[in-house]
Image: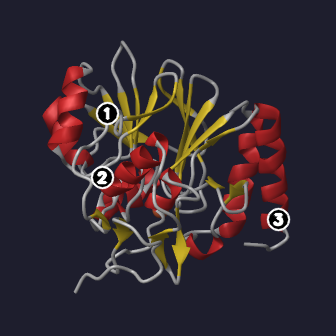
């Protein structure tokens, strides 16, 4: 039975005990929603307009519908898609069968690109229709396929995954192959990063926005880039080698499937990436 988690701050917003600890709510409401005993809770009640919007984001994206409010019924504007930077949006409505991973949209005049897939919902299709449809769906790896097939059929989009993770998405139209970077379209490159899974890929948009799937993320609690050894399904050593290769790119945004998304000057991002790789090669998780 669903119950209010006792760790929530007093007030009308709360998270119930069905929370699967996918961490998604914490990464759209850092500091407001925190971890407590292996689940997410409200550390305090939202007060400002921004905090109320963050709480709504958590509510709409939570794959177990565990983020609840006794009284909040009026959804503010601009909850989702959430604008992250020029042309890049977080879609919300995270899919339970993608373990609550975030998905993103790169809005382009020549055809928008969905990075990983949310759960199938009218709220997403309506906005994409308003914005001119969807040309490509690119999948970072086998875990975050979500409802990509339904979105692809609805919009007639091409779907890409790496050949080594294709078993999770046999419906795809196009494969990324081998270890070398591949252009999906102009200014949007797939870079294979075997490690988290064998077929993990990151996507570089416009030379500075890196969509990282579960290979690399921002940790709001540590204030640093991170990778997860306990959720590395293929090879931690290979993941470190793959991440080291990303230092060749001047990215200043990390958009993660699981974990936080964050902006930093490219030079600082590279320094933090190199420090993370050094920790990984030292056997630290
Ligand atoms: Fe994953």
Looking at the image, which residue is at 46% across and 54% down?
A: 46
Q: Does the image show residue 30?
A: yes
Q: Earlier in the sequence, mark 2 or mark 1?
A: 2
Q: Residue furthest bottom?
A: 1
Horizontally, is 261 left or right of 225 in the view?
A: left
Using a 10 Å C-alpha cutoff, classify the residue at mark 1 as few (fewer than 14 neighbours), some (14 to 19) or many (20 or more): few
**Towards the viewer: 78 or 128:** 78
**Towards the viewer: 148 or 73:** 73
Spatial CA distance of label 2 from label 3 is 35 Å
Looking at the image, which residue is at 55% across and 57% down?
A: 259
**Residue 9: image location, x then y, percent:** 47, 72
Q: Earlier in the sequence, mark 3 or mark 1?
A: 1
> According to the image, label 3 marks what residue?
279
Using a 10 Å C-alpha cutoff, classify the residue at mark 3 as few (fewer than 14 neighbours), some (14 to 19) or many (20 or more): some
Spatial CA distance of label 3 from label 1 is 42 Å
* Number of the front mark, 3 or 1: 1
Q: Earlier in the sequence, mark 2 or mark 3?
A: 2
Q: Secondary structure at mark 3?
A: helix
Task: Classify 53 as above or below 111.
Answer: below
Looking at the image, which residue is at 26% across and 46% down?
A: 148
> According to the image, label 1 marks what residue?
77
């Amino acid at each position: 039975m669903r119950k209010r988690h006792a760790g929530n701050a007093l007030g009308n917003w709360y998270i119930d005990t069905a929370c699967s600890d996918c961490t998604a709510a914490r990464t759209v409401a850092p500091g407001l929603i925190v971890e407590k005993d292996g689940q997410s809770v409200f550390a305090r009640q939202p007060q400002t307009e921004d905090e109320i919007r963050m709480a709504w984001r958590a509510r709409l994206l939570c794959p177990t519908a565990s983020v609840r409010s006794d009284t909040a019924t009026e959804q503010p504007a601009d909850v989702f898609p959430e604008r992250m930077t020029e042309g890049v949006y977080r879609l919300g409505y995270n899919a339970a069968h993608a373990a609550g991973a975030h998905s993103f949209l790169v809005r382009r005049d020549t055809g928008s690109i969905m990075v990983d897939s949310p759960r199938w919902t009218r709220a997403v299709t309506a906005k994409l229709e308003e914005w001119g449809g969807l040309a490509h769906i690119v999948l970072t790896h086998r875990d975050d396929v979500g409802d990509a097939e339904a979105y692809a059929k609805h919009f007639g989009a091409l779907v890409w995954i790496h050949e080594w993770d294709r078993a999770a998405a046999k419906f795809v139209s196009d494969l990324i192959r081998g270890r070398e970077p591949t252009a999906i379209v102009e200014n949007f490159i797939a870079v294979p990063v075997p490690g988290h899974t064998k077929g993990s890929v990151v996507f570089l948009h416009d030379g500075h926005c890196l969509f990282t799937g579960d290979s690399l993320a921002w940790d709001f609690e540590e204030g640093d880039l991170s990778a997860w050894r306990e959720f590395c399904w293929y090879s931690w050593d290979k993941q470190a080698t793959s991440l080291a290769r990303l230092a060749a790119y001047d990215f200043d945004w990390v958009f993660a499937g699981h974990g936080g998304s964050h902006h930093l000057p490219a030079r600082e991002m590279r320094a933090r990436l190199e420090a993370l790789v050094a920790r990984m090669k030292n056997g630290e998780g």
